[in-house]
Amino acid sequence: MSSNNNHFTKLSTAGLLISLGIIYGDIGTSPLYVFSAIVGHEVIQTDLIRGGISCIFWTLTLQTTLKYIVITLRADNKGEGGIFSLFSLVRRRAKWLLIPAVIGGCALLADGIITPPITVSAAIEGLLPLYPELPTVRIVIAIITGLFLIQKFGTSLVGKGFGPIMFVWFGMMGVLGLTYIVKMPSILLALNPYYAYKLLSTDTNAFVILGAVFLCTTGAEALYSDLGHCGRPNIRVSWIFVKTTLVLNYLGQGVWLIQHDGQLLGHQNPFYQIMPHWFLFYGIGIATVAAVIASQALISGSFTLIAEAVRLNLWPKLKIIYPTDEKGQLYVPSVNWLLWAGCLGVVALFQHSEKMEAAYGLSITVAMLMTTILVSKFLKARNVPKYIIWVFLAIYISIEGSFLLSNMVKFVHGGWFTLTIGTILFSVMWAWHTARKIRNRYVKFVEISDYFPILKELSDDESVPKYASQLVYLTSANFDSEIESKIIYSILQKQPKRADVYWLVHVNVMDEPHVKEYEVTSLIPNKLIRIDFRLGFRVSQNVNLLFRKVVEDLVKNGEVNITSQYKSLNRHKIVGDFRFIVLEKILSRSHNLSFYEKFMMNYYFQLKKVSISEERSFGLDLSFVTVEKVPLLLANPDEVELNRIRR
């Protein structure tokens, strides 16, 4: 955690406001549509409303408060949270933990496609009672498009206003709820868990209702994902205020609904019905801004998630831009426009928030289940007693399993959409990871010390034309005693490459998020030097800049001489030229691979076509880079049967 961000993560008024603005958008806008989803097309009944309030309150208590606020926030990876940060904490405990991490990450990304349309649509549709002919779909498309257009400029300026706006939003919800609670104080009895039990055990639509209730906690993952932006104390304290205002608003909506016992809800939204008529226009305006803020949080979260996946080698290399100096601010153009297209697809497909509710919640339930699995492993790593871990698993797999089964009812009504998106994303992550494992299997390493004499002789051999003064190779060898045989082949055989100094650069992605370290090993003094970068999974891998910084430090300390050895240039102390060599592996022959491996490798190479190149992903200056294609699999002459004809 950088020191300049510490004042935001410690408990403070500014930190509390930032927490309100960044992390509660999704969960904070759920009162817009939760009760509409619970009642649906059924006749309003007092038991349904009391049971619904009880279910909402205990879901927020058990799922959001206990699981996320109390337990999951403890899984702090050097100040960072989120499913990939959690995976980085526990991945050494078992290889199979990659599966829940990838499934959870894909489910969160799929959720990011449907959250902006449903929150913005639910807000804008509040205007329909005033303007029945209002083209809500066009307005929603315009707002969402505008939101994605501004992403490239960064959101730090807008973000400063998020906290106060969300404070007004939550305050408004609490006051509106209270105005109805005073009319019927007995509604507070609905918080009794008995009403939830009674509803779920007697109502024939219990599964459908449970799926609707789940919508009240869909933003819980954001609490953990944005741990690094706000800090644990600020999240925990601000949640007390947020939960109080949410519960008050749900209770107020419950009073209005009970007042209309025996009627059909129709197109009325209880959230807007508890507003005074004179306040409706202002309330809808505040709701729309809150919906945009909620959407912004999901979009920013998606960028962070993809950037982490790229660094963890779970996603193709993408262009990542840092529009501002603010920590955590990044922009991924390709993901931005894919999300935009997905959001517009949701709006075009479902048109209204009522229909979107049918598709919402299924993927996020899957993400929560995956987090439960990873948190249980984290608790085990922290030596928490086994019986407590088993109790934790039993409670939350039961709760989230029930929510998942209830949300499966939504599959045919639109849940298939987010599940399909999630499956496509999973296939990309899995293919990228699997192909990397296959490639690594065919990388042959040799002892670098065996080549010290010949490399030194080649460097001094003036009969060989000089290829570059400083020649730099990116190596995947984890140990400084090894080197890929293909690098030795490139230097000595493919085209003998004489250089004054050979450099080997290795990037090791660390489990800690923000670490920036390097180590220098002089293998042959002033002839062969290896630099090992240890970069956190949230650090930009701008190797060109990092390498230059290290070389400057080495020159300053007198550890290396990069002055050109050409006599005319050396006399004037001119710095020698640098050239990077990137070895690109191609699949030239694959009959040693199984059908599954061939399929994965072909999928991987198709993905490589749309991803940015290795040299661009490492931030190398393309004017100083040579890309050499090398086969992934070399043909073995012993396998070839050939008869010679003698005359």
Image (cartoon, grey):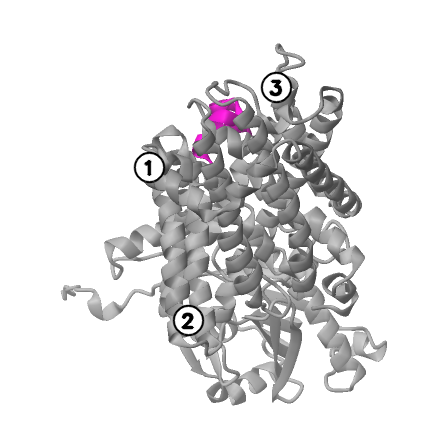
Q: Position of residue 580 (x, y in %)?
A: 61, 66
Quadrant that contains the N terminus: bottom right
Q: What residue is drawn where x is 63% and y is 59%?
A: 227
Q: How many marks?
A: 3
Q: Is residue 356 inside the magenta stretch?
A: yes
> Which residue position holds label 3?
136
- Could you say which quadrant of the image residue 69 lies in? bottom right
- Report the quarter where the C terminus lies: bottom left
Residue 253 in sight here: yes
* Residue 52 drawn above or below residue 129: below
Can you identify the residue that label 1 sits on? Answer: 202
Q: Earlier in the sequence, mark 3 or mark 1?
A: 3
Residue 264 percent coordinates (x, y): 47, 18
Q: Is residue 316 magenta?
A: no
Q: Residue furthest right?
A: 572
Give the camera-side residue of 173 and 93: 173
- Tag 2: amino acid: Ile
Q: Is residue 15 left or right of residue 236?
A: right
Q: Using the image, determine if residue 612 lies above or below residue 214.
A: below
Q: CA distance from mark 3 to mark 1?
A: 38 Å
Please tell me which residue is depicted at 73% across the width and 41% down the height of the picture: 171
Stretch of the chain drawn in magenta: 344-360
Front label number (2 vs 1)? 1
Circle 3 packing at 10 Å, graded few (<14), some (14-19), many (20+), is many
Q: Secondary structure at mark 1?
A: helix
Q: CA distance from mark 3 to mark 2?
A: 50 Å
In the rendering, at what x and y percent does residue 473 appear? 57, 70
Q: To which residue does mark 2 refer?
A: 388
Name the amino acid type tagged 1. Answer: Thr
Asked if marks 2 and 1 touch (Cβ < 8 Å), the reply is no
Circle nearer the N terminus (2, 1): 1
Residue farthest to the top, as pictured: 133
